Image: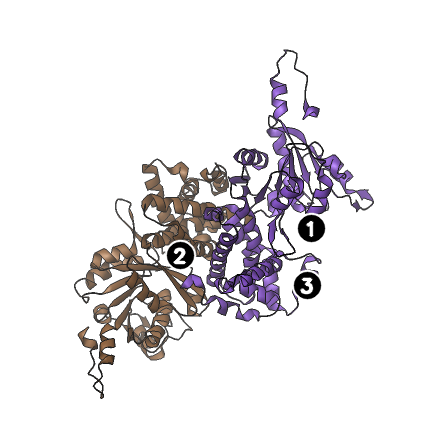
Chain colours: A purple, B brown
Amino acid sequence: MSENFKAPNTHGCYSDLETDMERKTVSIVGSGNWGSAIAKILGKNVVERKEKFNPEVKMYMYEEMIDGRKLTEIVNTEHENIKYLPGIKLPENVVAVPDLLEATREADILVFVLPHQYVHKICSTLKNNIKQGTVAVSLIKGFSIHEDGVIIPMSKVIGEDLGIPCAALSGANLATEVAQEQFCESTIGCEDDQMGQLLKELFETPYFRVAVVSDRQTVEACGALKNIVGIGAGIVDGLGFGDNTKAAVIRLGLMEMIKATEMFIPEMKVTTFFESCGIADLVTTCHGGRNRLLGESVIKSDKTIKQLEKELMKGQSFQGPLIAREIYTMLEKKNMTDKFPLFTAIHKICIREMDPKEFISCLRNHPEHL
Amino acid sequence: MSENFKAPNTHGCYSDLETDMERKTVSIVGSGNWGSAIAKILGKNVVERKEKFNPEVKMYMYEEMIDGRKLTEIVNTEHENIKYLPGIKLPENVVAVPDLLEATREADILVFVLPHQYVHKICSTLKNNIKQGTVAVSLIKGFSIHEDGVIIPMSKVIGEDLGIPCAALSGANLATEVAQEQFCESTIGCEDDQMGQLLKELFETPYFRVAVVSDRQTVEACGALKNIVGIGAGIVDGLGFGDNTKAAVIRLGLMEMIKATEMFIPEMKVTTFFESCGIADLVTTCHGGRNRLLGESVIKSDKTIKQLEKELMKGQSFQGPLIAREIYTMLEKKNMTDKFPLFTAIHKICIREMDPKEFISCLRNHPEHL
């Protein structure tokens, strides 16, 4: 942290210096819709909590040309990410940097918020180029799927790739609403108490309230598994059912989420499902998320998921069908698909092996009703 | 049960008789929207499970004249409750009876499903006029509030008034959707295992799935407390906030529901909140219920609750403001309002002591975020 050292002030007092030695430098890796919304929060917080954080936040931005101008230049002069978060002013101390290493060289805290498919590549560039003692937090929606079908949370990928501790932040946090400062909650999963509290101070604002739990893996499991249930909610909408049925799908989905998490993470705490990353994010996903839209579209057309991704997601992947497939594969190996009729039915509907109209029949004899 | 005895059949076999002695006669007390939807289920189930139940279900119906005809006569000839559940055929073995004692005299199981304000009067008529060994189950939405402000679940009122065991059934069960046979779930709270299983057999169908828990008081606490949170969801809708904020209100509301239940029912089980009577009913209430509508209306006008009840409920009471007031009174006595900022704010908004625009501010420093 030598670059932050200050000379003692004229009274010979070292308190500034001492404080300064503790100040953390924050860098953001990623600058899309969610990354920019978070940059707005972090930029403001580091200034307000200047005893804890250095006042400049570098934000790594993949360079793009917008009408002949560099996007980083636009962000650094107009303080607005006109491509990914138009209409929202960013604090002037958030500086877009097109060079990854320059953006992260001084960082004590790396905030990862970029599409999951780029993480490995970014980490291989960062490795051996970060300061000692640097920690990370992953805000990445999604997960990595190993060749052998194991689902790996992104905080683990980052932590292992860089050999540093990595926490996870997840919650009912639609980026645009966060950028508009609409009140919401979020959850940080972090095994280390002190690091968790530091991250809470970095992220929390009066409109973005953060709870810290130690159960990091469950925080991320919720974020992955909710996408399967979201498809189920969309199927129910598409079939024209009302609030009762949707509530039943949300509840049965939650019970399967808990059971699956127990299987894969024996030390998980069921109370984590009561946090924003749990039921709150699930409710939001089942009422407004992309996977809900997919479920509805699966009913209203007989197109494949691939075709629907092209039409609805500009070719990006829906997370729900991917995670449904991996969970199904694991359940089948363990001969446990009958304990997860909702997850199983959603997978089979996604691969068009089951008529979506049969979805409800699969829930009638759910183990929860025995 | 002597009136159910049959002579032995021509083979001298008493198996019918023996079975018959165990058969239970079911009566429904009440015949409104929810009562009629349940009558459809019970009428079908008693015939399908004839080894357990006698095939006629008497339904007590307060007599009304509809275009010069008695409503009981219409139900018994056209098998449709044209006033409270039009368009839905009832099984022919459901018989509407305008005399309360005639309707209930033979009952082994009394199903209470009438507006809560009539319960005391009905019970005082029934007392000493029911068979020995009769049990009851309450499907009544609402609760009784004692003069000293204690909130009493309806199953307790019925159980104590009649001196018999009384279970409770509650869940995400909008009557019209149940009558249309849309898939849903429900929860029976019953201290006695055997009675709980019998009730499950009475109520469960392929589209109405029932889970039984022993934690009856929590089942009913959920049904009461969710109405407060529903108002909060409506306020958020009225203020124009999005899905993040609504999810936060639902989650914080759930946490206050759990904490309040722990205070009043120390033996409660938190897992009951994962049942249909818990989160499922809460989600439904916060997206489509009457109290949600009230919350929205409180934002959009400056009318009192009384005026809004006149306009929106034909003078009937909203449950949410009543329960909010009682909970607030109790919390104030215990000096604990600061632990329940959501419940407290909703009460103060309902009595127009707080500007509903201040609602979100009250949630910013929720104890859940400490």
Q: Give me the disc on residue B277.
A: 2
Q: Is residue A338 above or below residue A59?
A: below
Q: Residue at x 52, y 35 (%)?
A: A193
Q: Chain of mark 1?
A: A
Q: Chain of mark 2?
A: B
The quadrant in which residue B7 appears is bottom left
Q: Is residue B347 left or right of residue A287?
A: left
**What amino acid is found at the position of numbered circle 2 in the picture?**
Cys
Give the crowd class for mark 1: few <14, some 14-19, many >=20 residues within 10 Å: few
Q: Give me the disc on residue A117.
A: 1
Secondary structure beneath dot 1 equals: helix
Q: Is residue B43 left or right of residue A65?
A: left
Between discs 1 and 3, the one toward the N terminus: 1
- Labels 1 and 3 within one chain: yes
Alpha-carbon distance for marks 2 and 3? 38 Å
The quadrant in which residue B142 appears is bottom left
Secondary structure beneath dot 2 equals: helix
Front-lying residue, A62 or B291: A62
Discs 2, 3 touching: Cβ within 8 Å: no
Instruction: Residue B332: give x, y in percent of width and height.
Output: 34, 37
Q: How many marks?
A: 3
Secondary structure beneath dot 3 equals: helix
Q: Is residue A78 left or right of residue A173?
A: right
Instruction: Residue B161: give x, y in percent of width and height.
Output: 21, 57
Instruction: Residue B266: give x, y in percent of width and height.
Output: 32, 45
Nearer the viewer's eye, disc 2 or disc 3?
3
Q: Give me the disc on residue B178.
A: none
**What amino acid is found at the position of numbered circle 1 in the picture?**
Gln
The residue lying furthest to the right in this view is: A68
Q: Is residue B69 above or below residue A351?
A: below
- Labels 2 and 3 within one chain: no
Front-lying residue, A97 or B170: A97
